[in-house]
Image: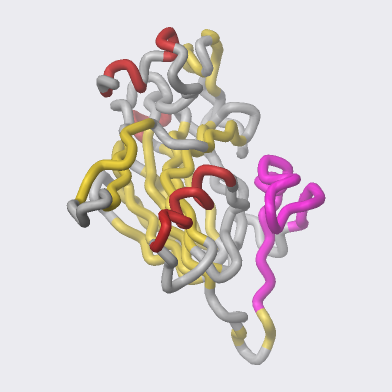
Amino acid sequence: MAVDELVNPASGSVRTSHPVQGLPRVVRHITGHNAEGKSIFLSTDVGDHHRDLGDKSAISNIVYSTNQVPVELNGDVDVKYARENEPGITVKGGSVCRMIDFGPGAVSPMHRVNSIDYAIVLEGVFKMILDSGEERIMQRGDIAIQRATAHRWINVTGNGLLAARMLFVLLDVNDVHVAGDKVEGYLGELGKDYAGLPGHEKAENDKVEVQVSEKQPVVPVAVELNGTSGDYYDSEF
C-alpha cells in the first residue's frame, strides 16, 4: 500500500484525525524480522490511537507504547500490545511515545504527571510555564526534560494564530519526594480527556494547588478538524 493511501481517509484504509490542518502528515514505520532473520518493515501507517483533547483544541496520536522496560520484542508481543491497548497518559512500568498537534492559541491547564518526559518541539513555538512562575520559550528542535514538575503549555506560534506540534516520550518513575513529602500528580481538566483509559478509570478534575494566570488572548481561527470546518479558540485542554 502506498503511503499516500495510508493518509487518505477516502481510501478507507485507516481512520485518521491527525494531523491538524497546516501541519505536515505523520507516517509511522515499524520494523521487525522475517523467518530468515532479515530486517524488514512490519507496517507503515499513521498510528493506532488518536484522541481529541480539550474540546478538539488539540489531537493526540500515540506513536507507540510499551508495558515493560526492558521491552520484550520476541514474537512481536510489543507490537501486539501497542496496537491493542490505548495507554493512559503514562503506562506503569512502561513507556509512551505521544505526538500532540495543538490548535492555534491552545493552552493546557497546569498539571503534573509522575513521569520523566522528553518533550520535543517539532513544529511551531511554545511557552512552557512552571507553577513557580518561571517560563521558557521553546522553538522547533528545543527539548524539555520534564521531571515530574507542574507545568502548562501555551502554543504561541504566529502570535497564537497557527497550529504547532510536540512529541512527548514518557517513562515511568519511582515515587518522587520533595522536602520530605511525596509529590502527587494531578491532571486538572486533562483528566476528563483520559477518563476510562488505564490509570484513569474514573474522570479526574483535580484542583491545582498553584495556578499561574498567564493566558493568551482568545482568537478564533477557522481550520478543519476531523473533516469538519470550525473555529479553534484559545481554550484550555
Q: Nearer the viewer, residue 154 or 148?
A: 148
Which of 45 and 148 lies nearest the eye of the viewer? 45
> Foreground residue, 43 or 126?
43
User: For this view, does 53 lie left or right of residue 170?
Assistant: right
Q: Residue 165 lies in what quarter of the image? A: top left
User: Can residue 30 be seen by looking at this rendering?
Assistant: yes
Residue 201 included in the magenta stretch of the image: yes
In the image, residue 44 lies in the stretch drawn in magenta: no
Q: Quadrant of the N terminus?
A: top left
Main secondary structure type of the part rendered in magenta: loop
Image vertical order of residue 214 relative to residue 217, above or below: below
Q: How is the image coloured?
A: secondary structure
Image quadrant where residue 73 sits = bottom left
- Identify the residue at horizontal 62%, vertical 48% (top origin): 109
In this view, the residue in front, 95 or 41, is 41
Magenta stretch, residue numbers: 183-207
